[in-house]
Amino acid sequence: MSQTAAAPVTGATAPTPIPLRELAPWAIFFGLLGLLVIFFVSADQGAISIPSGTAIHEWVHDGRHLLGYPCH
């Protein structure tokens, strides 16, 4: 049996920072997505509801109670 030597680790490279102009569109996208999720969880199916009916209310019903939103 022959033994193989592990390759030595050479100098590690430092992580490069991400410029703000490349990060901003993703932050805005996920921020708007988060606001949309919060809207659907906290909407009371009233005048400001996007879809009519109670479908969204029933889909997020347990999440409302978990987050402390009153829905009854």
Image (cartoon, grey):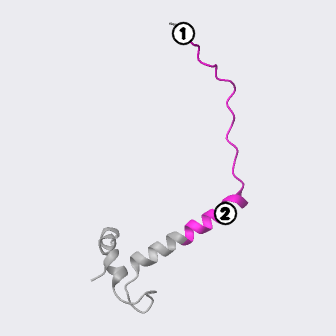
Q: Quadrant of residue 31?
A: bottom right
What range is drawn magenta here? 4-32
Q: Residue at x 34, y 82 (%)?
A: 55
Q: Measured from the top left, where is residue 15 in percent x and y?
A: 67, 41
Type of the residue with mark 2 = Ala
The reply, left or right, for residue 48 in relation to residue 70 is right
Q: Measured from the top left, where is residue 46 in percent x and y?
A: 39, 90
Q: Nearer the viewer, mark 2 or mark 1?
A: 1
The reply, left or right, for residue 21 in relation to residue 33 is right
Q: Is residue 23 magenta?
A: yes
Compared with 47, 58 (above or below) is above
Q: Whole-Å distance between the Cαs marked 2 and 1?
A: 51 Å
Residue sitting farthest toward the left: 72
Q: Residue at x 63, y 19 (%)?
A: 7
Tag on residue 60? none
Q: Quadrant of residue 8?
A: top right
Residue identifier under label 2: 24
Q: Residue at x 69, y 51 (%)?
A: 18
Type of the residue with mark 1 = Gln
Q: Nearer the viewer, residue 25 or 5?
A: 5
Q: How many numbered marks, from 0 up?
A: 2
Q: Measured from the top left, where is residue 35 in percent x and y?
A: 51, 73
Tag on residue 3? 1
Q: Is residue 27 magenta?
A: yes
**Quadrant including the C terminus:** bottom left
Q: Give the crowd class for mark 2: few <14, some 14-19, many >=20 residues within 10 Å.
A: few
In terms of secondary structure, where does tag 1 sit?
loop
In terms of secondary structure, where does tag 2 sit?
helix
Q: Residue at x 59, y 68 (%)?
A: 29
